[in-house]
Structure formats: C-alpha cells, structure tokens
Image (tube, rainbow, N blue to C red):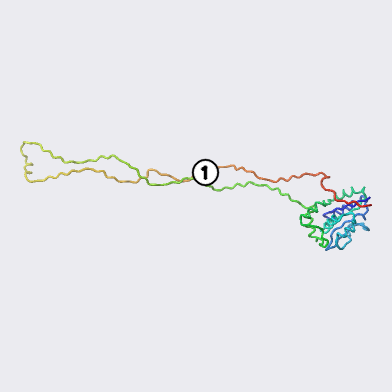
Amino acid sequence: MSTTIVGIFDRFEQAQRAAEQIEQSGISPSNVVITRGHEGNEYAVYGGEGSQTYTEPRHVKGGVSGFFEQLFGTDVDEQDRAVFSEAARRGSAVLRVTAPDDQVANVVAAFERFDAVDVDQRVAEYNATGYTGYDASAPVYTTEQTRAERDQFGADREVALPVIEEQLKVDKREVRRGGVRVYSRVTERPVEEQVRLREEHVTVERRPANRAVTDAERDTLKDSEIVVTESAEEAITSKESRVVEEVIVGKQTSERTETVRDTVRRTDVQVEQLDADRTTAAPRSKAAGG
C-alpha cells in the first residue's frame, strides 16, 4: 500500500530540500513532485516522472486545479485541490510525495523539518484576507506579490511584539486655593472730650465809705462813662485725619516638595520554548491505493 502526502512550503528552497531528503530515504524521484506558479497562468513542475533534478522545471499552461486533478487523481478531494491550487497560484511551493506506508513517517518528518505550513491555519489566513475559493481564471502572483504574501504569512516573517510601558509625567498647573478680599469703608461713631472753658462776669458792688476825696478822685468829678465787658470761652471742634493703622495686603511665595504616586502599565512579552513535538502540526495526507 502507498500513501500520498501533500504539503505547502512558503519558499521553493524549503520544498526542494525536503524533496531531496525524502529521496535520500529511498523514495523514487518519480514519486516526488514540486509545483508552484510561474508566470501569468502558467505553472512550473519540478521532479516527477523522467526527472532527476529540481532545478529545471517543466511548464504547464492552464488552470493548476485541473493539473492537480491529473497529478493527484482521486487521492485528494476537490476542496484540498482548491487549497493547493490557490497556494501555488500565490507563489508557494506544493510538494506531493507518494510513499509506501512504512515510509510515511519519514516523509512527514521531512515536511516538519523544513517547515511545511499548517494547511488549516493557512486557509484561515486566506479567508481573513477575503479569500472565498480558488479561481482558475485568476492570474499567478507576480514576484512582488509573492514576496508580500510571504512576508505576511511566511514562517520566516518577523512578528513585532511591542513592549509598551507607560511613563509617569508630572507637570504643574496653577489652581486657585482661596485668598482674601479687603474692603475699605467709612464708618461713624460718637466721641466726646472734656474741655475746661473760662467765663467772665461783671460784678457791681456798692460799699459805704466816709473819707476825704483824693486829688485823683476830684478829677473824676464830672460826667463819665465806664464800659466793662464780659467774655467767655466756648468749645470749637475741628477734625484732623491721621493714619492710625496700616493693613498690608501682599503675597508670600514658598515652595514645597510633593511626592506624586500613580500606577503605570507595561506589556511584558514572555517567550516560552516549545518542545519539538509541539512546533509543527503534521501536514495533511491522503491515502491512495498501491
């Protein structure tokens, strides 16, 4: 009995080295075929019947799905042929090996060693970009398109896992913390002071007398008039403005050190080394009559 194993490789060199290792295990080169898109609607076939090398391709025109049907016969169902055809159209290398049952393990090991892609994962990646099924009339990818495809899906693509770290940035802003408002108003209050005032009063006193007239008094013996006035002091008020107190309104500037506490986030990327039997899923294989 024999089994047909089909795998997809992102680079032709991977498929080529896998094919060479498979042949070294004793499988006939006529049972080892590599297919990939070439130009326009043409496909290149390496190895297979009548060929001992993977450097000189045979070119096949027309839709690769029909070619795979001829190549695989009934060993691979229509859905799988569509996936392999789409991979070849996009520039991937499709390696088909027909091996005796006791050599299947060696073939699978070679596929895994040279990084055959996980077919189900690749289909999911195709679907994520809008793939709905193989179109036989669609042209083969150009070199630039193939390179872009390999960069997007290929095993050797670089995946950047950003390590993001938040940093605490402390700035300052001026905020209003209160203050004072000073009003100046004129108020009145009653006051009183004690003051001593002097008054003059004219008094007239008659005293009895009996003495001789003096010469001076004799001169006053005529009509005369004496005027004596009275005076008094009265309180007079006046106001004088004086500065009795000063209210000083100003600002004092001081500085203080404050410890600002917060939390920042960071993404940590942990790298885990996987065991060898976990790195690559075995590619699909289909049983064929032998």
User: Residue at the location (7% across, 41% down)?
Assistant: 217
Mark 1 crowd level (few <14, some 14–19, many ≥20, 10 Å Cα)? few
Query: Is 232 left, or right, of 224 in this rendering?
Result: right
* Residue 179 image position (x, y, % from top left): 48, 45
* Residue 108 image position (x, y, % from top left): 87, 49
Q: How many discs appear?
A: 1
Q: Secondary structure at mark 1?
A: loop
Q: Report the residue marked by disc 1.
A: 254
Q: Quadrant of residue 134?
A: bottom right
User: Residue at the location (87% across, 55% down)?
Assistant: 77
Q: Nearer the viewer, residue 79 or 51?
A: 79
Q: Is residue 156 above or below residue 260?
A: below
User: Residue at the location (11% across, 46% down)?
Assistant: 225
- Kindly identify the amino acid type of the residue bearing the numbered disc 1: Ser
Query: Is 237 left, or right, of 249 in this rendering?
Result: left
* Residue 7 image position (x, y, % from top left): 86, 53
User: Residue at the location (78% across, 55% down)?
Assistant: 127
Return the residue found at the far left: 212
Q: Quadrant of residue 68?
A: bottom right
* Residue 107 image position (x, y, % from top left): 89, 50
Q: Nearer the viewer, residue 129 or 255?
A: 129
